[in-house]
Image (cartoon, rainbow, N blue to C red):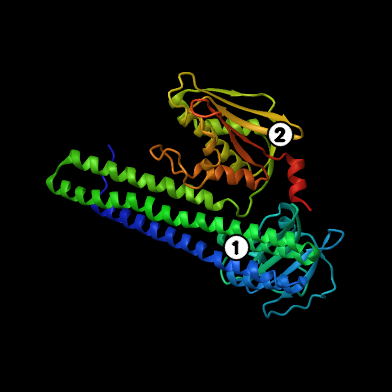
Amino acid sequence: MNKKPTYAELEKSKEELVQALQDAEAKAQRFSLEIPALIHTLHAITKNQGLASTAQAVFDVCKKKVGATAGYVALLNADGVENEVLFLDSGGLPCTVDPNLPMPIRGLRSEAYLNATVVYENDFSSSKWMKYMPKGHVRLDNVMFAPLVLDGKAVGLLGMANKNGNFNDHDVWIATLFGEIASVALRNARSFDQHRRVEEEMEFLIEELKEKNKELERFIYTISHDLKSPIITIKGFLGLLEQDVARGDIDRMRADIGRIRNAAEKMQHLLEDLLKLSKIGGSVDALDEVPFKDIVNEATNTVAGRLQERKPTIEITSDLPSVYGEVSRIRGAIENLIDNAAKFMGDQPNPIIEIGVQQNGDETIFYIRDNGIGIESEYHEKVFGLFDKLDQNTEGTGIGLTIVKKTIEKHGGRIWIESEGTGKGTTFCFTLPGRTEAMKRRVK
């Protein structure tokens, strides 16, 4: 028999939930406050025509935002084997390294170049990267490298070091955006005769940042609304529970505790999905080449509970190729798509989920097809929006397909929907690179 929670335990849970809400609101507000500075920097760097002055303008703001005290901006040389430092800020620490010595692409910075993503190390002096430090180098407590990417290739680095504290995922987000900004600035400095095109790219980035700001605002709205709703429920039923305890009404006490538990679980699911979404776009874990069929098999096992509810026939084609990427994230996206297909079968008497692949010229297209309720064409893009649930009465947080889309795009792919409308079933089509395509995209 399960032990009933005491009133003190319920009060403690309530306080923890309120604190979680406050922390989440503070985090969302902090992200939102970065947007004006980023937009201001975008406008400011367009006024700098010199490459060094442009790079330093980006570096100075990024360094301040992440709290670093030292760093540099460097570009790949013509041979693509060494860094050429545009300028270096030692943070006032002594450095006796000969500035004419080559800076080969090795150590932690090679990871940033190879994967074209932000990397960091918070205990550099004890890390495996320390062996690459030349004698007389500035002391490094922690480091972070953000690649400058042009046309899909990392062509330089924005390096940050010696933060008072540890680099974190928020710093990765900031460095990624400033790396993108610096990349555009580099293109501008190298190709002034293409100024009009660069201006268009700037405007595109500004619009993209505005869209990110809108997403952050929706984060704040959801946190303040969707999280406050279960907290109000919990507070209300805690009061009723107190009355039922006083009356000794066991049945009512059990009903109150059940409602409190359901509200807490709703908050937990929403917070877990928000955490998953926040991690996409951050530092990437190890990349592996894995047969897609293995990913599908693992995903179907994970969502076996949902599949057991509707008992659809699962058809998996035998010609699935291998994919290259962060396996856990790809598997999470496939789990979401399979779960989604089973959830929206409607009253289909013979539910079928087909998982396969097809070729369109040189492009490999994966698909997950169902014969469920279908989606009208005007909603094919909307379903990928943050918190955009077509039916607010269905279970879920409205974040799942957003996570799927961002995961696929993070790996250099794209995703779209094919459906003839209501009652016609839905096909989610997406692309994922194999190892060769991924390396072409990520390696200089």
Q: Identify the residue at the far front of this view.
A: 196
Q: Quadrant of residue 147?
A: bottom right
Q: Position of residue 353 (x, y in %)?
A: 55, 25
For numbered disc 1, what is the local secondary structure?
helix
Quarter-of-image position of residue 97: bottom right
For label 2, the SS is strand
Compare residues 339 and 121 and report the one nearer the observer.
339
Amino acid residing under circle 1: Ile
Measured as percent of width and height from the top left, residue 280 is found at: 58, 50
Q: Nearer the viewer, residue 402 or 22?
A: 402
The earlier-in-sequence mark between 2 and 1 is: 1
The mark found on residue 436 in the picture is none
Q: Residue at x 27, y 55 (%)?
A: 11
Residue drawn at x 71%, y 34% is: 364
Q: Is residue 433 left or right of residue 385?
A: right
Point out residue 184 in the picture as x, y percentages from the top left corner.
Answer: 71, 62
Decide: marks 2, 1 in contact (CB < 8 A)? no
Q: Residues within 10 Å of mark 1 (few under 14, many from 20)?
A: many
Residue ID at (49%, 45%): 399
Circle on res. 364: 2
Residue 184 visible, this orientation: yes
Return the residue found at the far top. 350
Q: Name the residue carrying label 1.
A: 174
